[in-house]
Amino acid sequence: MRGHKLLFLAFLFNASLSSGIVQAHAGDHRSLSELDRLITQNPLQASLLVARGALYSRTGLWEKAERDLTLAETLVGKEDVAFEFGQLYYRSGQYDRALGYIDAYIHAYPAYVPAFLLQARAASEAKQLDLAIESYRAYFRLSATPQPGEYIVAAKLFAASTSEGSKKALELLDFGMEKVGLNAQLQRLAVKLEVDLGNTGGALTRWYSLIDQLGHSAEWNTTLAKLMILDNKLEEARQVILKTKMLLASSKQSPAKISASKTIVDLELKMAHPNN
């Protein structure tokens, strides 16, 4: 557990992984001032250097972060500083370099869930898709509370990877919904993937599952009509469109209403000229 103890202070100052956009946060300067004072008193305490390096990394001060982490690495082992080095190089766009450090950290601490997420993101940016997919799978398997957005990112990666990718992406999305519950974001993507695979019946079934969450909205109904048309259920689609028109007639003007009205016109034209 030496590495986790060493990183404790770093985690106090470290933000969650982001998509590579680094922003300063309120309180950074106060935290940096406190770390500076502590390091002046204890210049060779590795945990303080890691904590300050992590803060520099998070605020985009790459050279200062690298300096602190490099010094900390001479005081302990590479694996004890490897996670923060991985974050530093990921944030600064040095993805291959980041992967080397993340791999070293995972070998030392194979149960640390954020390391697999960081590895997946860095591998994706480095175009190492096999590693990214493997890392995402490990992350979802180990994480007790994965974020729905991560399933979406991973599923899109899966779908783009191989000819069987869309099926694997659907399996991942279903696995995700077993963990986090029925989620509109995940099911929306699953519906799209079902359509891409030509399974309009499966897409309809999935879309109906969201009726309690979204069924009151014009957007849900217009999407239902689209799927019905794709599944050659034209009469049912007409009934849904009629219902949606009535729903829109009783609602206030809004960008969503305008968009839905335009969609209805397009759908009616499509049904009137199915071969166009």
Image (spheres, helix red, strand yellow):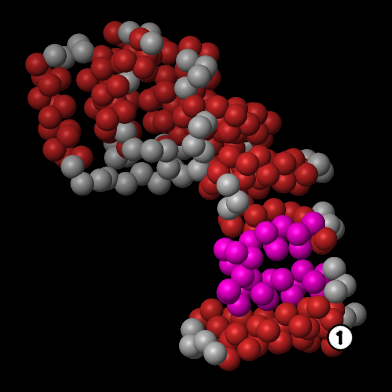
The image shows residue 121 at horizontal and vertical percentages of 54, 36
Asked if residue 73 is among those painted magenta in the image, a careful observer would answer: no
Q: On the picture, is 210 further left or further right than 94?
A: right
Q: Secondary structure at mark 1?
A: loop
The image shows residue 59 at horizontal and vertical percentages of 29, 40
The image shows residue 239 at horizontal and vertical percentages of 76, 83
Q: Residue at x 38, y 38 (%)?
A: 16
Q: Amino acid at mark 1?
A: His
Residue at label 1?
A: 273
User: Who is closer to the viewer here, 150 or 76?
Assistant: 150
Q: Residues within 10 Å of mark 1 (few under 14, many from 20)?
A: few
Q: Residue at x 78, y 87 (%)?
A: 269
Q: Residue at x 63, y 61 (%)?
A: 210
Q: Residue at x 51, y 38 (%)?
A: 146
In the displayed orientation, state which residue is furthest to the right. 275
Q: On the picture, is 158 further left or further right than 116?
A: right
Residue 203 vs 45, above or below: the answer is below
User: Who is closer to the viewer here, 196 or 86?
Assistant: 196
